Amino acid sequence: MAKPRLATCSLAGCFGCHMSLLDIDERLVELLDLVDLDKSPLTDKKEFDRPVDIGLVEGGCANDHNVHTLRQFRKNCRILVSVGACAITGGVPAMRNMIGLKECLEEAYITGPTIEGKGMIPNDEDLPLLLDRVYPSHEVVKIDYFLPGCPPSGEAIWFFLKALLTGREPDLPYRMLKYD
Amino acid sequence: MSDQDFLITVDGMKVRAKRGQTIISACDAAGVYIPRLCHHPDLKPAGHCRLCSCYIDGRRASACTMPAAPGMVVVSNNEELNNDRRVVLDMLFVEGNHFCPTCEKSGDCELQALAYRLGITAPSLTYQWPKREIDASHPDVFIDRNTCVLCSRCIRASRDVDGKSIFGFSGRGLGMRLNIDSETKLSDTSFAAIDKAAKVCPVGCIVIKRTGYRTPIGRRHFDKAPIGTDIEACEVGDPE
Ligand code: SF4
Ligand code: SF4
Ligand code: SF4
Ligand code: FES
């Protein structure tokens, strides 16, 4: 029987959640026995070309490219999981949500105390278009499971994945359910 | 059991109560935890948050304000009530701006701990991202209204314990905010870090400066055991 396929992506996140996945240490070998790693920054596979069983999403949506990737994940993954505070709440990037995009960019690039001379807001057409605010993943597509934490511990990620892969409900024990 | 004491039933358990005692305080003394947020054992009950809402003799009422009466039958821990509690918590999360990973209260926060206890992994409502003011004017205390849950503990503590009445609410509904002595800065008031009002905030809104992040992760109040465990660990006397 073919192994289940696992895909991962990092949207508006810091890659800390991916680091935490790598933090399961030697159990990575066991994980690779259980799944085929498909599209992921860890494999550098760029596009989906077959259905995937589990997709892990790190980070919320801060720009149109994040939205595009998230929709691709929803389309191609049977089970989609929001991993970490950024995917679930917007997290640290969403701290701009109470300020407003324009004000935030002006402070960062024009009026801020660290700007020397006449600043300018980056406007290259190759840059993804920033959204009005940072959206948690479940406000953009349907998410099946949530694994909170910043990042969730390697232990929590391992517990969660093993539960999913063995067909159990991934109910985290108390000490693994964390928002920080 | 003195002559004055009587028994009530809470989730099928016999709980001893005294005349004038609220249901929640009788339960606390008996080792039965009812979830709560605005209630504080040292303050007058307010009945603001509705988290302690129970079926009391078949009707919904808040256990923190309802006086116990002989023979009362209370249901607190059932799926319907816990689901309603989850919705109340969800509302508090999305109506404020809660960034737990950076919050000084994380690990010691009662809102977060209640969400853990009730197994919330993500809010079911849409984030509101309201604009809330910060007041860092006071030398020793910081006010971050982004996390205020409008429980009124600080108001009651300042008024009834400290005798200062420094805090109040303004506005209503979604626009309701914590006010300081009608629109002044905290540094313009007689507020002090040793005030009761500085110690009762359940969330990261009123925090003492230069004390944050001191306790390592793993040793904070709610890292190991759910909120209410200390109450549940109380010795339950034989109610006879
Ligand atoms: S949840 Fe924390 S660790 Fe994960 S991407 Fe966001 S900031 Fe990084
Ligand atoms: S007040 Fe509590 S729930 Fe809100 S951000 Fe701080 S730790 Fe999280
Ligand atoms: S500041 Fe804290 S204690 Fe005061 S109303 Fe807000 S949450 Fe309650
Ligand atoms: S604890 Fe009873 S209403 Fe808040």
Image (spheres, helix red, strand yellow):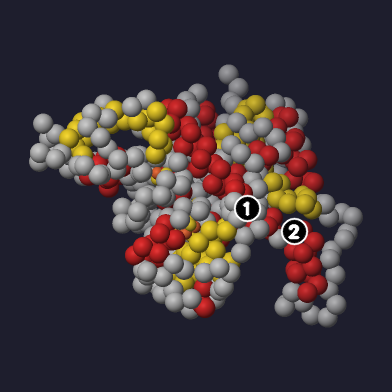
At 61% from the left and 39% from the top, the residue drawn is B125
Q: Is residue B213 above or below residue B203?
A: below
Amino acid type shown at disc 1? Gly
Q: Position of residue A27 (x, y in %)?
A: 47, 40
Amino acid type shown at disc 2? Gly
Does the image show residue A29? no
Q: Position of residue B65 (x, y in %)?
A: 36, 43
Q: Are marks 1 and 2 on the same chain?
A: no
The residue under label 1 is B175
Image mark 1: chain: B
Q: Position of residue A42 (x, y in %)?
A: 64, 45
Identify which residue, B32 or B1, lies in the foreground: B1
Structural distance between the alpha carbons of marks 1 and 2: 19 Å
At 63% from the left and 34% from the top, the residue drawn is A143
Q: Is residue B191 above or below residue B59?
A: below
Quadrant of the image containing the N terminus of chain B:
top left
Q: Position of residue B129 (x, y in %)?
A: 65, 52
